[in-house]
Each structure stands twice: as C-alpha cells, then as structure tokens.
C-alpha cells in the first residue's frame, strides 16, 4: 500500500499576532475587522475556495448595524434583497401576509436582508483584498496548543496542505454538526508548517478541529428529525418569488420558502424523524430530486410543484450545542459554529457568529496595542456564551412552533396571519420581533460592563451590557431647541444616533445634557474638553486604524441637548460653537422630543441628564447620572480601570 509523504516541516517565528482558522463568513469578518484595526493576520482554510452552497440566507437588522459601524454596509444593501413580508398558506390557500418592517425607533434599518452566505463571504473577501489580505486555501489545521512557561507565551499550530489538489477526500460526506476529523489521504504529498502566533481564532465550523484539540466540551443534543434543503428553479401554483413564505400542507409538514438571487428559490422542509438504526450518511447519498419533489408536492397540495433545475440538494440533522468555554488560556478563541450550532429557524446562526467576531476583534486590538491587560479584557469574550444560549433557545422555539401539528397549532397560525394584516394596516407597519432581529441582545456584568458603584442600577432597557439604543436627533441651530414649531414651514432635518457610531476601535461617549445647555453650556464644554484631552494623552492606539476616521482618537464624544421652551432663555454663542465641531469632538445635537434621553434612562428636562459610555461594539459599558465634574470623574475612573496607559 503506498504511503503518505511529507515535505520537510517549516517553523515560523513568533511574529504573527493572530492566526484565523476557517474562512467562512465569520473568519473572514474577523480578519477584516482586525485588518481595519491594523493587526496583521493570517487566515487559512481547508477548502480550496468559497463553497457555492449557502446554508445561511438571512442577515438581521443587528448585523446590518455592525456593518454600518465598520463601513461595509453599502455592499450588503446592494447585494441583498430586503425581507419585506411573511406569507402563510394553509392547504395552498393564502391565509395572510404580514409586512416585515422593524419599527424605526428600534433601528436605522427597517428590515433584514436575504443574502446567500457565499455572497456575504465574497463581500468580505473583496474588502480584504483592498487591504492586501488573501485567504490561504488548502491549509488544514492538524493540531494546536498553548506553549507556556518560557519567556514568551504563544500558540503553536501545526497545519498542512497537499502539494497537489485539496485536503478533502473525494465523495466524503460533510454532515452538518458531524464532529469526525478527516484522515490523511493515501498517495498524497503534504507540506507541513508549524505556525507560532500570539492568538488563534477558531472559526472552523461545527466540526472544529481546534475545539477538539484543546478538549473543550460541546454539550447539547442532536434532534431526531431530518430537514431537506433545496435550491433551484421550479414551477409552483403558490407564488414563491417575494418575501418569506410558509406553506402548511395536508400532510402536516411545513415548507419554508426563501427568495434568492438570480431567480433561484430555496425550500426547506422537515421531512420526518430518523428511523431507528438509520445510516444518515447513506440517506444523504441516496437523496434525489425525485424524493424532494414528492415531499414538496404532497405538502403544497392541491397546488402543483415541479422542479425545473437544482443547484443544491442536501439533508441535515439539527444539533443544538454550545462550547463550554469560548476562551482557552487567554490565547485561543472559538467563534461561529465552532462555538455554537443550532436549528436554522429564525436565521440566528450566521448572525450570531458575525457578532462573535465583532465582539472579539476590538478586544484583541486593544490588547495587542498595549491598551488593556489581556487577563482583564480577553476573558470578557465569554459574554458571548449567553448570546449563543439565547440563539439556541429562540431557534428551538421557532422550530417547535413550525413543526407543531394538530388543530390548536393550526388555529394559532391561522389567527395570527388573519389578524396580523389588520394590525399592520392600522399601525402602518408590523413589528418584526426585536428578539429575531437580534436587537434585544444584552451582556452580563463583567470587567467592561460596570454599573455605577453608588447610583442605583437602572432597569434592563438601559442598564450596562445592553445594545446601545438608536434614536432620532436634530442638528443644532438656534431655533432647533424651540418646542413650538407651528410657525415652521419646512420639516426639520433629522439624523440617527447610530449614524454617529462609526468605527471599530472607538469608545463613544454620549453626553445627555438635558436642559443643562441652556445655562451651563460653557461649563459642559470646558469639562468635556479637559477630560477628553487627558484621555487622549493617556491612551493612544499605536497600530494603523482604517475604520472611517482620519485620526486615531479612541474617544468620540457626542453632546445631546434636551428641548427648551424658548430660544430667549439662553445665550446661543457657546452652543453655536459646539455645533460647528467635527463629529465626535463634542458636537452638539438636539433630542427635541426627549425620547432618546428616555431610551438611555435620563430625563430631557429639569437638568437630569447623564453620561453613557458606549463600547466599540456599541454596547453600553458604563453610565452615570449628571454631567457635572463628579460625573466626568466617574467616567475617568471607568476608563482608568479598563485601559492601561502606555507609560504604565
């Protein structure tokens, strides 16, 4: 029997800051974020190219928000299709159709997008190429470990690639959630490298080799039913070209139909439970278009369904699993499917993985720039575990609801879609659940989510750890604080608070000045300038930053004034000067109706404002009532605890 041969092993020096294993969307996004943060990365991928088959198909409003902050949003808006409505059919008859519009007070994005996972990857790849970063395809991670005890601690990772062809054996079935590792192929010659890096980010999927090599448990369950998934062109009496369509059939099964680019359609259906002793890989190999067509035809009946062409047909089991830890020895981090897998119901998986990457990148950037102690900041990445638990619970609930059978389940669905359009017509929109859109995410208290030591902890809506809320603001001008607008002919221009949150590495300090600015503008301006100047001198970012600003200033300050009864009660000179400042330099805006103050737990009148510190990933890190000297000292103490001065 011929044996496998290896070229001599090469050994890297400890000069690589971050090695990323896995070039799916999560790994690519992590690479892009770190590159924008000026952190050199090496990203390897076992496959030879992006897979044209896309398990994930939706991007929620929260993902669009983080794309907005990192400057990639336009490419996604151009490539994706808005999720405009959800239609429900029972026995081929339309019960109702609901417009999927996220109420504008929640997010600057009114809806999510349909976009194939492969196209998401292509957008990240194109952006990385602009920075001169390329994926190294064909490299397979074999082993990894943290080397401790010497002068410098590091991660040592063994990787290989075949001299000819790829590392994945032909006809090898890759089952979603399968944790089996690939073996060497005979008659292959391999090049092997040992890579030393300061950190390793594992984005290598549900079968993560990294997770296995560092012995992190992946507890959970594998559901007993099978799901069929098909992409292609078809003829069907039920319109399948717009929005999300659910079809409940006479056989008790439910079809979920999604539009795709280039006229393609995706159909998913829970086929049946696994038979005792069933060989799932054999089931997958024997899956045919004819079988899928018959299942869909039975579910769509009496509507007709016929496949014209197929681009992808697969079957998978649903795993609900979450890694017991995300951070290993403060050197190795799990992200995406390597950290959590669950049902695709609700489209939580890819989105949760992207948010993992967003959470981790700025923390690695701060540590590698000496701005934070690794033992202080990096363990906070464990806060993402609760988000995985949330995604698993939600997707499980939605899957259970979708699979529910019987009169009661049918009646609930029927009434929901029968009454929903009436509500939508009255309210003007139908609120797509913030939990599905991932706008209600919340982190636990930890080193960087710190309640005030003496002030009462506020309620959940605006306590530390929550996603920073969006709001409507006005640019300042002398008459913009006037409450009575009866004499105004033209509507006042508005802007979104989240539009100010540009950047990957920046803290955003929101000064909710209430009606202080009517009398205390000079004092607030002086306090702001003095403290921010001290912060900028104390904490600087040494790496290059490519995240939308010309400077490397880590502290962007936005002053938000409350309404005032008349313009005659204050001197506008200081306010006008503040209104002319650059964005992030203490520029003043107006919260005319006071709603944005309320969203952050402050009153817009009676001088009951406060300061909120928003982390670089747009979660609330700290908040304090008041805008006086003591409040600024409290914010200074927060930063002094979280950050390390370069002279220390």
Image (tube, rainbow, N blue to C red):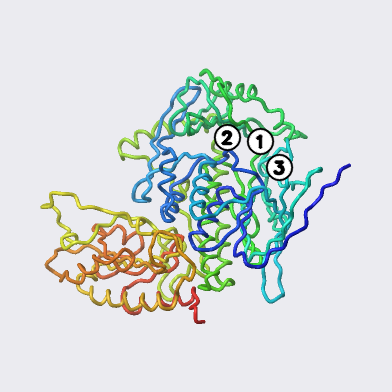
User: In the shown orientation, is residue 574 left or right of residue 186?
Assistant: left
Give the mark nearer the N terminus: 1 vs 3.
3
Question: Foreground residue, 70 or 557?
Answer: 70
Q: Is residue 294 depicted above or below 278 in this figure? A: above
User: In the shown orientation, is residue 161 left or right of residue 248?
Assistant: right
The residue pinned by badge 3 equals 165
Question: Foreground residue, 642 or 318?
Answer: 642
Give the mark nearer the N terminus: 2 vs 1.
1
Q: Quadrant of the N terminus?
A: top right
Query: Can you see residue 568?
Result: yes
Camera-nearest label, 1 or 3: 3
Badge 3: how crowded within 10 Å, few (<14), some, or many (20+)?
Answer: few
Distance from disc 1 to disc 3, alpha carbons, whole Å, reads 36 Å
Distance from disc 2 to disc 1, alpha carbons, whole Å, reads 10 Å
Question: Foreground residue, 495 or 561?
Answer: 495
SS of the residue under disc 3: loop
Distance from disc 2 to disc 3, alpha carbons, whole Å, reads 42 Å
Q: Tell me residue 295's x, y (percent).
A: 61, 24
Image mark for residue 403: 2
Labels 2 & 3 near each other (Cβ < 8 A): no
Q: Tell me where residue 334 sits by quadrant.
A: bottom right
Image mark for residue 225: 1
Q: Tell me residue 480's x, y (percent).
A: 19, 59
Q: Tell me residue 356's x, y (percent).
A: 54, 56
The residue at the far bottom in this view is 648
Q: Is residue 372 depicted above or below 418 in this figure? A: below
């Amino acid at each position: 029997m011929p044996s496998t041969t290896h070229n001599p092993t090469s050994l890297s020096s400890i000069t690589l800051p971050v090695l990323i294993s896995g070039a799916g969307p999560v790994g690519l996004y992590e690479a892009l974020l770190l590159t924008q943060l000026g952190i050199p990365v090496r990203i390897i991928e076992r496959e030879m190219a992006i897979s044209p088959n896309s398990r994930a198909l939706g991007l929620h409003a929260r993902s669009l928000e983080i794309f907005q902050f990192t400057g990639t949003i336009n490419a996604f808006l151009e490539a994706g299709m808005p999720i405009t409505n959800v239609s429900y059919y029972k026995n081929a008859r339309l019960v109702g159709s609901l417009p999927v519009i996220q109420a504008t007070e929640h997010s600057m994005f009114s809806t999510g997008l349909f976009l194939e996972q492969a196209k998401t990857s292509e957008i990240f790849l194109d952006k990385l190429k602009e920075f001169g970063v390329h994926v190294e395809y064909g490299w397979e991670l074999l082993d990894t470990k943290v080397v401790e005890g010497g002068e410098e601690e590091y991660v040592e990772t063994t990787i290989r690639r075949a001299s000819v062809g790829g590392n994945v054996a032909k006809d090898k079935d890759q089952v979603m959630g399968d944790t089996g590792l690939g073996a060497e192929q005979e008659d292959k010659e391999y090049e092997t490298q040992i890579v030393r890096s300061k950190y390793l980010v594992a984005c290598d999927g549900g079968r993560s080799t990294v997770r296995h090599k560092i012995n992190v448990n992946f507890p959970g369950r594998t559901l007993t039913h099978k799901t069929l998934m098909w992409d292609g062109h078809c003829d069907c009496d039920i319109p399948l070209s717009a929005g999300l369509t659910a079809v409940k059939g006479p056989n008790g099964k439910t079809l979920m139909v999604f539009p795709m680019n280039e006229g393609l359609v995706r159909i998913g259906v829970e086929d049946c439970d696994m038979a005792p002793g069933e060989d799932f890989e054999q089931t997958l190999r024997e899956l045919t278009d004819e079988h899928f067509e018959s299942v869909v035809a039975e579910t769509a009946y009496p509507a007709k369904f016929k496949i014209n062409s197929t681009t992808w047909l697969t079957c998978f089991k649903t795993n609900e699993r979450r890694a017991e830890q995300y951070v290993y020895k403060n050197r190795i981090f799990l992200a995406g499917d390597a950290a959590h897998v669950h049902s695709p119901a609700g489209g939580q998986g890819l989105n949760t993985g992207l948010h993992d990457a967003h959470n981790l990148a700025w923390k690695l950037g701060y540590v590698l720039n000496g701005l934070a102690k690794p033992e202080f900041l990096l363990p906070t990445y464990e806060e993402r575990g609760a988000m995985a638990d949330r995604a698993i619970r939600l997707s499980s609930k939605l899957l259970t609801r979708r699979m529910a059978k019987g009169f009661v389940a049918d009646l609930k669905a029927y009434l929901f879609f029968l009454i929903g359009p009436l509500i939508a017509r009255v309210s003007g929109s139908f609120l797509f659940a913030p939990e599905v859109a991932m706008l209600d995410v919340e982190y636990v208290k930890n080193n960087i989510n710190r309640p005030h030591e003496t002030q009462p902890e506020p309620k959940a809506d605006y306590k530390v750890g929550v996603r920073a809320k969006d709001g409507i603001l006005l640019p300042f001008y002398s008459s913009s604080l006037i409450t009575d607008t009866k004499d105004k002919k033209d509507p006042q221009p508005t802007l979104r608070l989240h539009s100010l949150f540009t950047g990957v590495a920046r803290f955003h300090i929101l000064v909710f000045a209430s009606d202080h600015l009517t009398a205390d503008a000079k004092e607030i301006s002086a306090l702001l300038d003095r403290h921010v100047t001290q912060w900028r001198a104390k904490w600087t970012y040494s790496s290059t930053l490519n995240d939308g600003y010309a400077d490397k200033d880590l502290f962007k300050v936005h002053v938000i004034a409350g309404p005032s009864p008349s313009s005659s009660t204050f001197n506008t000179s200081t306010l006008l000067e503040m209104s002319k400042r650059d964005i992030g330099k203490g520029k003043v805006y107006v919260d005319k109706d006071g709603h944005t103050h309320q969203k952050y737990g402050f009153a817009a009148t009676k001088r009951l404002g406060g300061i909120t510190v928003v982390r670089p990933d747009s979660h609330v890190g700290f908040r304090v009532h008041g805008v006086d000297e003591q409040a600024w000292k409290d914010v200074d103490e927060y930063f002094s605890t979280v950050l390390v001065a370069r002279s220390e």
